[in-house]
Image (cartoon, grey):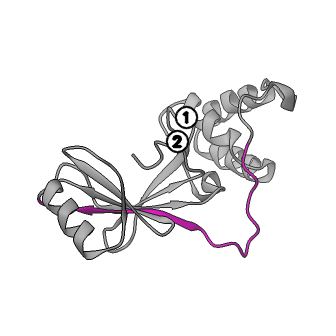
Amino acid sequence: MDSIDDYFEYAMDLPESQRQDLLKRLKQDDPALAEQLQAALDGQVKNPDFLCQEQPPIPRGDEPDVLHHVTVVVGDVPDAIAWYSKVFRAKLLRQDTHRAVFLLGAVELHLVDERQPAGLTIVRRDVAAMGPSRRRPDGVRGLHLVDPWGNAIEVIDRVTNSAGG
């Protein structure tokens, strides 16, 4: 995270106990920044009637995360659309020259050209508890990870029309 704004935005999505843990770690690493963050958090609006966005409920510990989509890199998007349409019973949701999106059951398959990375997107409502994440312009909080084998994984807190690009 680069600034007090990043830390504040991140801290706002944490439960109070995790927010206190963050402040405690930050006091050790950067006392001045910790003081700024504490002041910003103390000055926040607490009345839920004034909050701009309702937070989704945190799932129970036994609820699995949800796979939203898998992104596959293809050499030629129009050829890939033809092949995937012929081989699988999938619904083509949208397409352009660089991307196509199919629906396979409840999971989307994104076919992209070489300009975009392969990977997968998982929905987890408590993504902020996983580590430093950022809120996108559409309001979705996301975290980008790379597994030990180099696979790109995006974790988002909810799905919107533009979730996962």
The residue located at (76%, 68%) in the rendering is 60
Q: Is residue 72 above or below residue 64?
A: above
| In-front residue for pair 29/94 | 94
- Taking the magenta stretch, the answer to whether it contains residue 57 is yes
- Taking the magenta stretch, the answer to whether it contains residue 108 is no
The residue located at (63%, 44%) in the rendering is 26
- Left or right: 39, with 128 as reference point: right
Picture coordinates of residue 108 (x, y %)? 42, 61
Q: Which of marks 1 and 2 is nearer the N terminus?
A: 1
Picture coordinates of residue 119 (x, y %)? 34, 62
Q: How crowded is mark 1: few (under 14 residues within 10 Å), some or many (20 or more)?
A: some
Q: In this view, does 14 lie above or below 32?
A: below
Q: Is the magenta stretch mostly helix, strand or loop?
A: loop
Contact? badges 1 and 2 (CB < 8 Å) = yes
Give the SS element for disc 1: helix
Picture coordinates of residue 2 (x, y %)? 47, 34
Give the SS element for disc 2: strand
- Answer with the quarter of the image where residue 123 lies: bottom right
Q: In whole angstroms, how far apart are the C-alphas of marks 1 and 2? A: 7 Å
The residue tagged 2 is 134
In front: label 1 or label 2: 2
Picture coordinates of residue 159 (x, y %)? 55, 50
- Answer with the quarter of the image where residue 54 lies: top right
Magenta stretch? 55-75
The residue tagged 1 is 6
| In-front residue for pair 60/26 | 60
